[in-house]
Image: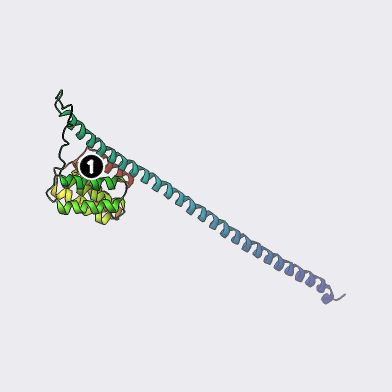
């Protein structure tokens, strides 16, 4: 048998091994490609899960913030009611005790100024939630009775009407007029707080932070300072 004849089977075996190796290589490459695709899909699933978790966390944080602010506004409203009740009680306490009263004719009703009637009507509209009508009445009051003792209260309620209608840029000037022109009014500190909240609502964070800190540092112990401190805490400060 010649040498050439003996080499033919060996060459055929080598070719078979080569072909087999190429097939295996293709299968391995295909499996690697499939694995890469699976890894890509899994990574997308993980990223979407992380995004949903972040969205849920942000929604929960916003809900907590809104709840704190609602509680702060509720406390402020309660404070105003308490102040009004205290004033009424003081008025009742100032009446003379044991004073004789006519048995036939009723006592005359104390005269109420026209300005106070207009103011009370506007506040009634505000309490009913009719903010546009209350705004109209308060603006008429401020124009008609510029020297009324109710002017600071009217400005404050006017600011609240605009604030509750999300018109923060219109509410801010009303509170600023109280701060500038009526520093001795009981509405001075509430106006400073609402002005700061207006700034925050308008996205003017540095100015709002400064205004909140002025309340915290300058009027510590007041209800407005405590609310301002809560606002700063909600901002992470």
User: Quadrant location of residue 38?
Assistant: bottom right
Callout 1: helix, strand or loop? Answer: helix
Q: Residue at x 39, y 48 (%)?
A: 62
| Quadrant housing the N terminus | bottom right
The picture places residue 100, in percent across and down from the top left corner, at 14, 24
User: Quadrant location of residue 23?
Assistant: bottom right
Furthest toward the left, the residue is 147
Residue 71 in sight in this render: yes
The picture places residue 30, in percent across and down from the top left corner, at 65, 64
Depicted 160 relative to depicted 97: above or below: below
* Left or right: 53 as drawn, with respect to 217: right
Q: Residue at x 44, y 48 (%)?
A: 57
Number of residue marks: 1
Depicted 111 relative to depicted 41: above or below: above
Furthest toward the front, the residue is 104
Depicted 82 relative to depicted 211: above or below: above
Mark 1 lies on residue: 216
């Amino acid at each position: 048998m010649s040498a050439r004849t003996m080499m033919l089977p060996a060459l055929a075996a080598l070719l078979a091994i080569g072909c087999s190796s190429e097939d295996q290589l293709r299968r391995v490459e295909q499996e690697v490609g499939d694995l890469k695709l699976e890894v890509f899909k899994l990574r997308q699933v993980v990223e979407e899960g992380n995004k949903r978790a972040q969205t849920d966390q942000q929604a929960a944080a916003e809900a907590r913030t809104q709840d704190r602010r609602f509680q702060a506004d509720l406390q402020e409203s309660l404070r105003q009611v308490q102040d009004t009740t205290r004033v009424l009680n003081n008025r009742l306490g100032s009446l003379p005790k044991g004073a004789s009263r006519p048995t036939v004719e009723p006592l005359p009703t104390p005269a109420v100024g026209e300005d106070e009637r207009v103011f009370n009507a506007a506040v009634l509209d505000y309490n009913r939630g009719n903010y546009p009508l209350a705004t109209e009445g308060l603006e008429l009051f401020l124009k008609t009775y510029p020297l009324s003792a109710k002017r600071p209260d009217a400005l404050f309620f006017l600011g609240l009407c605009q604030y509750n209608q999300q018109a923060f840029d219109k509410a801010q000037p009303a509170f600023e007029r109280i701060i500038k022109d009526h520093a001795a009014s009981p509405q001075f500190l509430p106006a400073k707080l609402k002005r700061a909240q207006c700034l925050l609502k308008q996205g003017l964070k540095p100015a709002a932070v400064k205004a909140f800190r002025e309340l915290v540092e300058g009027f510590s112990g007041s209800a407005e300072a405590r609310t301002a401190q809560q606002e700063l805490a909600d901002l992470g400060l």
